Image (cartoon, coloured by chain):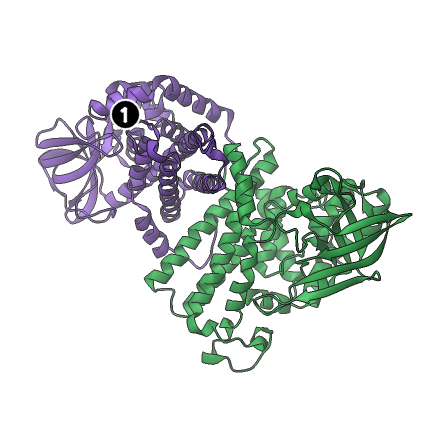
Amino acid sequence: MDFDFTDDQEQLRDAVRKWVDKGYSFERRRTTVKAGGFSRDAFREIAELGLCGLYIPEQYDGMGMGPVEGMVVMEELGRGIVLEPLNQSLIAGGVLSGYAPQAAKSAWLPKIASGEALVVLAYQERVARYRLDICEAKAAQAPVGHMLTATKSIVPAGDQADAFMVPALLDGQLALFLVERTASGVSTQAYGTQEGSRAAEVTLQNAPATLITLDGLTALEHAVDIGIAAACAEAVGVMDKTLAITAEYMNTRKQFGVAIASFQALRHRAADMKMQLELARSMSFYAALKLNAPAPERRAAMARAKYQLGNSMRFVGQQAVQLHGGIGVTDEYIVSHYFKKLTQLEMTFGDSLHHLGEVSARMQDTAGVFA
Amino acid sequence: MDLAFTPEEQQFREDIRTWVRANLPTDISHKVHNALRLSRDDLQRWGKILGKKGWLGHAWPTAFGGPGWSSIQKHLFEEECALAGAPRVLPFGPVMVAPVIMAFGTPEQQRRFLPGIASGDVWWSQGYSEPGAGSDLASVKTKAERQGNKYIVNGQKAWTTLGQYGEWIFCLVRTSNEGKPQTGISFLLIDMKSPGVTVRPVVLLDGEPEVNEVFFDNVEVPVENLIGEENKGWTYAKHLLSHERTNIADVNRTKRELERLKRVAKAEGVYNDVRFRDEIAKLEVDVVALEMLVLRVLAAEKSGKNSLDIAGLLKIRGSEIQQRYSELMMLAAGPYALPLIQEAMEAGWQGDYPGAATWCAPLASSYFNLRKTTIYGGSNEVQRTIVAQTVLG
């Protein structure tokens, strides 16, 4: 039982925090949002810190690190509400390392680690909502490899990514494929998202694809669980900063001749936010420490974590806006952007209601962290 | 970072489990697992069994005969006791007054009082709250006037848990009206058999006389029963409260009760009702999150590397969850929680409970009883004020 970070982990945290504080100002972020929601330059800077290769073994030029390091990094990016989707590189690194055939590993992992290639998960379909076992995308054998026909929605940085990891049905079984964006039959239609990041509809029409694994559901579940743990950690960073911004505002803003931090109704609200933040942080630790557990245990843990995080995010975000008053609902002031980030994170990889259903379905007779 | 206990800690847990299974009387654990009434004898019997083993003061330092366990070991011990169905150790002696006597008492006071606490032979009560001093504890009015080598105590204490069994009571008394309210308080140990002490049980909403009013009418207390210095009692009281950190979240008992909730929900046919089951699922996550919070505090105490400002959260969350599981258990029983049949809450009752659902008998009483948890130990509103201080300054 140990929740301390090692010196190496603290150094990693410091390095990322320094980049966020110095390199990723709110102005830079705003410029990126206006320009479409994704900056290749910023993504390259993240890669230069080594972060894209965090989950990639050293033999493929990665850092070979684990979920605790992933958590540390995502928390810090969350603090700066960074738009560029590092969690996608964590997912791609983890899943390709774990499931892809040798040739695909050699071809892609070093490029993902260096940031040269952005590989993103393209799994969302209109019919599936948050479920992973529902899929209409079809795969077929091709003379060389496979061909995919699919429409995938809200693919992070979809028109900027270099390749997609795509689940599709092959002979009725869910398999996972890799599709290059520049391949024939691939088209993308990009748009901004509520938080300001970029996404796209990705349409595949007999697009050539490389098989990652025939056990697609197992790999997809693992991919999403890596994403959930990363989203939980990112959310903790966002909430931590949101509460700090709110506390500072409450001590500065005066009404009725005094700082509004002196009003008990508002103080208790701040205490409730702190409660939600710490419950969330606890469950983010839990998610990170369960990410390498066997699949059933890991799945159950991610559902528990994401349920808690979703509720915490909604509460902290909504109350931060409320405690700011009018300035909280403006685009100009920073806190509304943190609120929108939290809202979007709740709805990424399954919202609270979805995960409540997962927790409910998996419930055992026992109770607690070790059950 | 590691979620696992060390092999040594796991072995420790096994050893405790074996011992508790061999030594916890089954008639007592049966009552605990089914929320049946515990008698004074039940509580004291288990206390004395622990005392004989040297574990009633399981958090005590070795210098005072404690086992010298780490924060994690203490937690594992408490968890194994709770899961086995041991009654809660009444904290007033071993957890509350003993650390104060150790820290601020004279060697003579330590020799005189600690053995009886460690063995479980002497029943201690807490004399803190008064009719006019609840969350605002520093406004205590019970007066102790020095006359020669004794104090004359007059006044009234309130909400004294199980004070009807009490043999000794530790009290915050007013010895001065100078300066701030906090500066005129002293910490006095009073023999409840002294002339002038009257105990009046107060029946609570569940029908049980769990608390008492304790009246002091010209009670003579020898000055050697004063702990530390006169007018420094507030400092000692705060020391006492600081020993109630992770304990008060009661997460171990909560885990046991969540398991019971699932059994009750199954027996009552609501476990597979989606609306009801989801409420249990929410609680399941609440309990995991609370346990993680507790483990974080314990691990921080063990490593000493990072101090956490989250202990205040434990009381708030722990008490809310206790209320929720008792509420859901009552709701699971539905209308069969409503009959008030006192005898059905006694072990071994053979009568006819409506619908033969005898296990439903104590559910509403437990629910009503646990409303106290967000009120005692510093109300949750007071706790929020303390937490807000850490956020806003």
Residue A234 horizontal/vertical position (percent): 37, 33
- In this rendering, would B160 be left or right of A262? right
- In this rendering, would A244 be left or right of A197? right
Which of the two residues, A48 or B106, is positioned nearer the viewer here? B106
Residue A241 horizontal/vertical position (percent): 41, 30
Q: Amino acid at mark 1?
A: Ile
Residue A236 horizontal/vertical position (percent): 40, 35
Which of the two residues, A162 or B283, is positioned nearer the viewer here? B283
Parent chain of label 1: A
Mark 1 falls on what kind of element? helix
The green one among the chains is: B
Residue at position x 60%, y 48% in the image: B378
Q: Does residue B191 show up?
A: yes
Kindly indicate the quadrant of the structure image that contains residue B60. top right
- In this rendering, would B187 be left or right of A102? right
How crowded pointer 1 is (Cα within 10 Å; few <14, some 14-19, many 20+) is rated as many
Q: Which residue is mark 1?
A: A112
Which of the two residues, B41 or A110, is positioned nearer the viewer here? B41
Which of the two residues, B213 or A223, is positioned nearer the viewer here? B213
Kindly indicate the quadrant of the structure image that contains residue B262. bottom left
Residue B18 horizontal/vertical position (percent): 62, 57
Kindly indicate the quadrant of the structure image that contains residue B342. bottom right
Residue at position x 43%, y 23% in the image: A12
Q: Is residue B269 above or below residue A241?
A: below
The purple one among the chains is: A
Residue at position x 68%, y 42% in the image: B238
